[in-house]
Amino acid sequence: MSCTRKTLHDHPFNLWKFLVFPTIKAIDVFSLTIQSTLALCSVASISLILYFAFSNYSHFPLPHINTVTNFNQIGSVSIEGHEQTNISHILFGIAGSVKSWNKRRNYTELWWKPNVTRGFVWLDEKPFPNMTWTETVPPYKVSEDTSRFKYSCWYGSRSAVRIARIVKESFELGLPNVRWFVMGDDDTVFFTDNLVSVLAKYDHNQMYYIGGNSESVEQDVIHSYTMAYGGGGFAISYPLAAELVKILDGCIDRYDKFYGSDQKIQGCLSEIGVPVTKELGFHQLDIRGSPYGLLAAHPVAPLVSLHHFDYFESIFPNLTQIDSVEKLVSGYEVDPSRILQQSFCYDLNRNWSVSVSWGYTVQLYPFLVTSKKLETAVGTFQTWRSWDTGPFTFNTQPISSNMCERPVVFMLDRVESVGVGKTLTGYKRYNMGKEEKDCPKCNYTSALAVQFFNVSAPKFNPDLWNKSYKNVFGTILLVSKYLAMHHVDNAARSSMAQMELTTLYMSKLEAASALRVSLLGRKIEHLRTIDLESGKL
């Protein structure tokens, strides 16, 4: 028997002899069958491994893809489609209440676009008979009764439960062609074009949870650094929403001690395993005092949202808050991507530094200031709970007690489109009062003689947000009490480092010298060659 096994093993072709001559013992048949089976299994396993290794087909689809397929009867998202995300793909869920709506609806009217934006204001009860509802605001829906859910946060409000379920109730409406569910409050102002630009960067077929933190560290410590704050708004992709709605009600009871709706949502998403993707343009604005310093030094990111307007001073001095927001929105509507974007300019002839926060303010320093200092927010605001000077989640600098170290401030006066693809914004000097005259230095006196800034710029291409390197150059034109600034795209001035000094004349204006210098974006490598003490190159 041993010899037979050896012969069959050593000479595989002897197998055919066995088939032809059935004189071989039965036990050898069994042995040969086992060996043949093992050989076939080995070949099949190797083939299967090679097939999976080199095949482009996904044999194990992600769970959320199956989930989307299962929920097609409720809502739809085009998994195979390649259409660029646009505003029609976003469904807004705005948290409101009957008592607060009449006061706060003005904020929603500033950004809501009838027949363009989609979504609902979710109320705690049916509106009062004397409440009017127009097309200038989202249609309303009344939230389901949430009395069956637990809520045990002693310093919070049960409304957090109702608001947390808005994403679930929105999903269950089954509206077609929804890629993103965006949540916000009735005092949240969204800059929808920029919101679309941000969301378009992400694959809506994947699980995403996008938003921003609180500005006040004390708020992040109390609530969480890992959640998107609801007042600043947050976005949940359709596949993630499909998973979230399965567990949300149970999560609400499990996290009954959590204060806010946004905190409860984040707790649920942590169970799914999806962290927050932070985008700098979402602003909770957990601040007190004046927001000027924060808005004048906005990060290099599209402005997506602002919140809490009734809790800090007006954005524009001498205007009501609603008028202030409307004025800011007017600039946004002319050039959405450029709103609040900060640029730096240096007049080396006068040793002046200029910071432009487009569509909001211009700051003129009658001395040279580094870009690091210009991009750091001046502490005109305080923390949310303690009204303290900090800390915040970004760097700040104190307001100098020395008047000669403060900038001359100009606020937006007008904005308009000019020509093809260009804008013109005007900034008028904001009179700070007699304090401005406390600085006796002559350079400060000459800076006070400037009354207006006119900034001319090409409209910002939103596709630039997807590029890693952005730089803008420009021309500054100084005429006694009139200052005009002209941006030039980097593409048109790619080889320009420093433009030459020239002399220009303006129609119907007195002759004046004009200094052409670089209008610096946030990339200012060539500025390193400037001696900030002497102002010389």
Image (cartoon, rainbow, N blue to C red):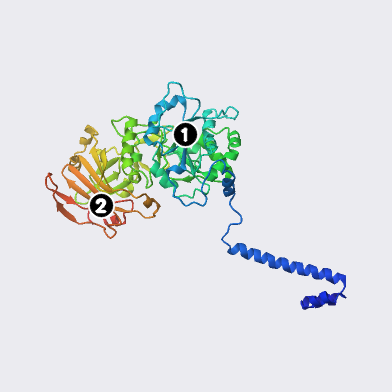
Taking the image as shown, residue 170 lies to the left or right of residue 386, namely right
Taking the image as shown, residue 219 lies to the left or right of residue 257, namely left
Residue 140 picture location, percent across and down: 47, 30
Whole-number angstrom distance, CA of label 2 to CA of label 1: 43 Å
Residue at 83% over, 76% down: 20
The nearer-to-camera label among 2 and 1 is 1
Q: Are circles 2 and 1 on residues that touch, CB within 8 Å?
A: no
Instruction: Say whether residue 280 is visible.
Output: no
Query: SS of the residue at dot 1?
Result: strand
Query: How many residues crowd mark 2 within 10 Å: few (<14), some (14–19), many (20+)?
Result: many
Image mark for residue 406: none
On-image quarter of the C terminus: bottom left
Taking the image as shown, residue 361 lies to the left or right of residue 70, namely left
On-image quarter of the N terminus: bottom right
Q: Which residue is mark 1?
A: 120
Residue 79 picture location, percent across and down: 52, 50
* Residue 247 vs residue 231, the one in the foreground: 247
Residue type at mark 1 is Phe
Q: Which residue is mark 2?
A: 474
Residue at 40% over, 41% down: 192
Give the quadrant of residue 496.
Answer: bottom left
Q: Earlier in the sequence, mark 2 or mark 1?
A: 1
Query: How many residues crowd mark 1 within 10 Å: few (<14), some (14–19), many (20+)?
Result: many
Residue 415 picture location, percent across and down: 27, 40
Residue type at mark 2 is Gly
Residue 156 picture location, percent across and down: 52, 29
